[in-house]
Image (spheres, rainbow, N blue to C red):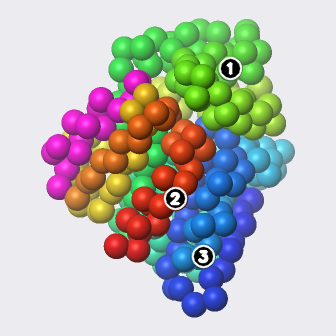
C-alpha cells in the first residue's frame, strides 16, 4: 500500500485528499497542511515509487504502470482509511489521476481542485515527451527531469517550485523514472477523453497565468464543462500551491467550504 499520513479533525466529517505530481511527493503540500487541517480531515499520500512509497516492495509495484493501476493505488488507501467520499486536490500529473479516479469512481469524489492541470499536451509538450522517449534509457533521468522542469517552470519566480521538484525527483531510481515515463504513451487519448466528457462533478481549476503549456487548454474546457470554474493566479507559474500558497489556501478552502 502507498505510504500515507492523515490529520484527523476534531469535529469535521469532511475529507480532503492531496495528490502530488510525477517526481514529487506529499512534501510539496507543506504550505497547505497548517491551514487545511483547521477545517478538514486531511489525507496525504506518496504515489508509488515516490517519497516513502518505495519501489522495492516487489509484491506491490511489479505490475505495469498505467493510469488505472496508479489510480487504484489511491482508491486502496481511501478504502483502507474508510473514507467514503473526499474532496481531491491535485497538482500537475496528480490532476490526471484525480480526473481518472472521478471517471471510474464518481461516487467517491465530492469535488476536484486541479492546480497546474494537465488537460492537453501542446506541440511543445509533445516534442518534450518525444525527446524523453528517445533519451530516457541513455541519459541520466535527473538531467531530463531538470530540463523538463526548466521548460515547464522557466521564470525566476518559478525557481522555488523547480528546485523543490528536482530535489524530490532525486529520490527516484532511474528504473522508476522510466516506468513513469512510459505512461506518456497513453496520455493523449486519456486527455482527449477528459476534454470531451463533462463529468458533472464540481471542479475548480487553479492555474498560474504563466503556466504557458497548460493554461490555454484549461480555458477551453471551462467554457464547455458546466460545473467547472477557473481561477487564474497572477505572477505565478505551474506549481500554484508552492508559488502563491496564501492565495491558493484561501481560495481553495473557501471553494471547498462553499
* Marks 2 and 3, the one that precedes in the sequence: 3
Image: 126 above or below 79? above
In the picture of the structure, the residue carrying the numbered disc 2 is: 249
Work out how far the residue at label 2 is from the one at label 1, CA to CA, in angstroms. 27 Å
Q: Is residue 116 magenta?
A: no
Q: Is residue 161 left or right of residue 190?
A: right
> Which residue in the protein does label 3 denote?
38
**Mark 1 vs 3, N-terminal side:** 3
N-term mark: 2 or 1: 1
* Residue 7 visible to the viewer: yes
Residue 175 disc label: none
| Numbered range of the magenta stretch | 211-226
Please report contact status of discs 1 and 3: CB closer than 8 Å, yes or no.
no
Q: Which residue is mark 1?
A: 146
Pointer 2 with pointer 1, Cβ within 8 A: no
The residue drawn where x is 53% and y is 68% is 16
Which element type, helix, strand or loop, lies under badge 1? helix
Q: Say left or right for 139 vs 157.
A: right
Give x and y (percent) for residue 42. Answer: 61, 70
Q: Nearer the viewer, mark 1 or mark 3?
A: 3
Which quarter of the rendered picture does the N terminus lie within?
bottom right
Dot 3 surroundings within 10 Å: few (below 14), some, or many (20 or more)? some
Amino acid at each position: 500500500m502507498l505510504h500515507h499520513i492523515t490529520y484527523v479533525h476534531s469535529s469535521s466529517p469532511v475529507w480532503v485528499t492531496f495528490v502530488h505530481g510525477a517526481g514529487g511527493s506529499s512534501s510539496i503540500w507543506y504550505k497547505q497542511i497548517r491551514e487545511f487541517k483547521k477545517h478538514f480531515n486531511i489525507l496525504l499520500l506518496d504515489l508509488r515509487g515516490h517519497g516513502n512509497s518505495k519501489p522495492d516492495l516487489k509484491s506491490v509495484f511489479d505490475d505495469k504502470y498505467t493510469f488505472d493501476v496508479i489510480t487504484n493505488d489511491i482508491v486502496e488507501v481511501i478504502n483502507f482509511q474508510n473514507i467514503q467520499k473526499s474532496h481531491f486536490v491535485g497538482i500537475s500529473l496528480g490532476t490526471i489521476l484525480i480526473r481518472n479516479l472521478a471517471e471510474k469512481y464518481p461516487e467517491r469524489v465530492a469535488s476536484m481542485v486541479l492546480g497546474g492541470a494537465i488537460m492537453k499536451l501542446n506541440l511543445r509538450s509533445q516534442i518534450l515527451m518525444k525527446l524523453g522517449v528517445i533519451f530516457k534509457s541513455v541519459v541520466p533521468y535527473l538531467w531530463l527531469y531538470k530540463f523538463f522542469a526548466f521548460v515547464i517552470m522557466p521564470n525566476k519566480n518559478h525557481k522555488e517550485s523547480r528546485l523543490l521538484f528536482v530535489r524530490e525527483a532525486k529520490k527516484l531510481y532511474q528504473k522508476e523514472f522510466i516506468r513513469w515515463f512510459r505512461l506518456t504513451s497513453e496520455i493523449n487519448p486519456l486527455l482527449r477523453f477528459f476534454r470531451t466528457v463533462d463529468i458533472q462533478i464540481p471542479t475548480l481549476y487553479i492555474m498560474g497565468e504563466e503556466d504557458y503549456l497548460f493554461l490555454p487548454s484549461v480555458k477551453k474546457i471551462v467554457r464547455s464543462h458546466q460545473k467547472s470554474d477557473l481561477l487564474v493566479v497572477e505572477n505565478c507559474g505551474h506549481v500554484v500551491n508552492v508559488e502563491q500558497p496564501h492565495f491558493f489556501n484561501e481560495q481553495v478552502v473557501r471553494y471547498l467550504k462553499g
